[in-house]
Image (cartoon, rainbow, N blue to C red):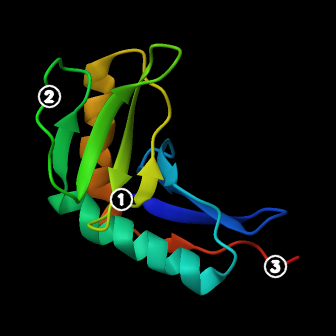
């Protein structure tokens, strides 16, 4: 089972979603300034990931999907990445770079599966 990990930074809070094996499979799309805001962001990932459409922007003449959606694209280094957009079009989670497209697609499936009822681990108090 996956889990969301909230981390405190100098500018606010960020989150990552880890799979059952401890690998980070997605991170939040922004830095949040309040804990309740980041919890809302996590809830949006959990709600949207399982029902999100898939838009593969690496295919010529790809069909635009409606939000919520996972967008698969290649970055400047030529690596495959995905971003999860909510119904309103806001990016709510992003991936690391993958050298192979099937690995990126597996990452999406892992987010779909792990985000739904993943517990939230709060940051340590200083």
Gap in Å between the C-alphas at discs 1 and 2? 33 Å
Which residue is depicted at the point 80% across and 65% down? 11
Which numbered tag is attached to residue 125?
3
Q: How many marks?
A: 3
Q: Residues within 10 Å of mark 2 (few under 14, many from 20)?
A: few
Q: Secondary structure at mark 3?
A: loop
Disc nearest the viewer among 1 and 2? 2
Read off the residue under disc 1: 1
Q: Earlier in the sequence, mark 1 or mark 2?
A: 1
- Tell me which corner region of the image, top left, top right, bottom left or bottom right, holds residue 42: bottom left
Residue 71 placement (x, y as % from top left):
29, 40
Disc nearest the viewer among 3 and 1? 3
Q: Are marks 1 and 2 in contact (CB under 8 Å)?
A: no
Which numbered tag is attached to residue 62?
2
Gap in Å between the C-alphas at discs 3 and 1? 25 Å
- Tell me which corner region of the image, top left, top right, bottom left or bottom right, holds residue 1: bottom left
**Residue furthest toward the right?**
126
Which residue is depicted at the point 18% across and 20% down? 59
Which residue is depicted at the point 29% across and 20% down? 101
Which residue is depicted at the point 31% across and 68% down? 88
* Quadrant in which the C terminus appears: bottom right
Q: Are marks 3 and 2 in contact (CB under 8 Å)?
A: no
Q: Is residue 52 above or below residue 38?
A: above
């Amino acid at each position: 089972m996956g889990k969301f990990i909230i981390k405190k930074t100098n500018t606010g809070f960020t989150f990552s979603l880890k799979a059952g094996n401890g690998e980070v499979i997605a991170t939040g799309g922004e830095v949040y300034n309040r804990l309740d805001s980041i919890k809302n962001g996590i809830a949006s990932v959990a709600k949207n990931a399982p029902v999100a459409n898939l838009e593969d922007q690496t295919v010529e003449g790809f069909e635009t999907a409606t939000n919520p959606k996972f967008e698969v694209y290649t970055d400047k280094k030529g690596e495959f990445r995905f971003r999860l957009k909510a119904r309103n079009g806001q990016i709510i989670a992003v991936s690391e770079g993958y050298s192979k497209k099937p690995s990126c697609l597996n990452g999406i499936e892992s987010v779909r599966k792990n985000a739904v009822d993943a517990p939230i681990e709060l940051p340590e108090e200083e």
